[in-house]
Amino acid sequence: MVRLDDLQIFVRAAETGSFSAAARELDIAPAQASAALQRLERALGVRLFVRSTRRMRLSEDGERYLPHARAALSALASGEQVLSEGREEIAGVLKISAPSDLGRNVLLPWLDAFQARHPRLTLQLRISDRMADLFRQPVDVAIRYGVLEDSSLVSLALAPDNRRVVCAAPAYLARMGAPGVPADLGKHNCLCYVMDDHVHDRWSFELPSGACSVRVGGDRISDDADVVRRWALAGAGLIYKSRVDVIRDLNAGRLVEVFPSTWGQRAPLQMVFAHRASLTTSVQHLRDFLAAQLRELIAIS
């Protein structure tokens, strides 16, 4: 008997190329994901993945089975939606906090589309690079980068494998050249932003030789990360930003990445709540909607 949760883990592992990434997205332990895949393979009597010590890929049987697994999960989701439409209405007020650049340039059109689907929902959007205090401020959910420092908060993954990227406009690189390694950043004009009264002028990297950090400097600093990105687009210097924030600029050639993508510091994107009671129907639907939009955005990069 094939279990539906095993199918879900199989599909996410195939799409992410990693058991651990699938486990993070589904909020389960990597060992649970691995056991689910083994259970599914036993039920089907085939090997779905070809594994090695360093990587995994779909087997021929896995490639053939994947579209059927997706169709089964899609049919289940459609059925659940049909049943829920009559008894759960997405309505009321939803108060959201988001970083400036991400909120204005990535999330805003998606939130418009979400609200168009649910016209009885009222959105209150707080755009700021200052961290919202979920226990004191009138915010239902905060969308944040990075790892949670407060273990009492609850989070749901949106883009768990996101990293930061050092990039600049072609005009700047033509004028000043590109740094070859992080140590070269000291010779460049690095544009920094302020968060919670702290200037982020120490950039950390994960190199093949190990972790390192470099203190950088430049002639411009702002407490609005959107302004910093606009300075970079104008050719003023290098920035170190979340890939999600600059992905469209990179795809269009307005900005150019200067280091290998695996060197960037991890910057997982997530929805954060003060309590599990905040995980309402509206929030759950918004999380699913935003996660789907982010997967599509990242997939075309």
Image (cartoon, grey):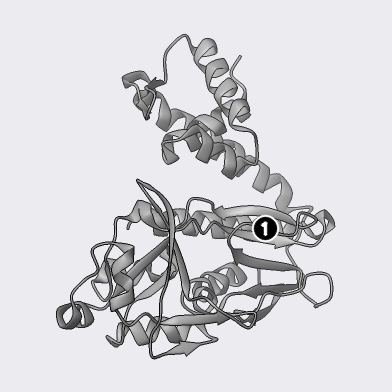
Name the residue: 53% across, 17% down: 38
Residue 159 relative to residue 14: left or right: right
The spot of residue 132 in percent (x, y) is 71, 75
Quarter of the image with the N terminus is: top right
Instruction: Judge whether residue 254 can be spotted in this image.
Output: yes
Q: Residue furthest bottom?
A: 219
The spot of residue 151 in percent (x, y) is 76, 54
Name the residue: 52% across, 85% down: 224
Front residue of this view, candidates 196 and 103: 196
The spot of residue 108 in percent (x, y) is 53, 76
Check the image and report above or below for 16 versus 117: above
Check the image and report above or below for 289 versus 104: above
Report the number of discs: 1
Instruction: Judge whether residue 4 can be spotted in this image.
Output: no
Front residue of this view, candidates 198 and 120: 198
Q: Quadrant of residue 282?
A: bottom right
Residue 269 relative to residue 156: left or right: left
Name the residue: 38% across, 70% down: 246
Front residue of this view, candidates 155 and 40: 155
Quarter of the image with the C terminus is: bottom left
Disc 1 marks a residue whose amino acid type is: Leu
Q: Quadrant of residue 146?
A: bottom right
Q: Quadrant of residue 133?
A: bottom right
Residue 138 relative to residue 233: left or right: right
Provide the residue designation for mark 1.
148
Front residue of this view, candidates 39 and 29: 29
Q: Residues within 10 Å of mark 1 (few under 14, many from 20)?
A: some
- State the SS at label 1: loop
Name the residue: 32% across, 65% down: 183
Q: Residue furthest left?
A: 174
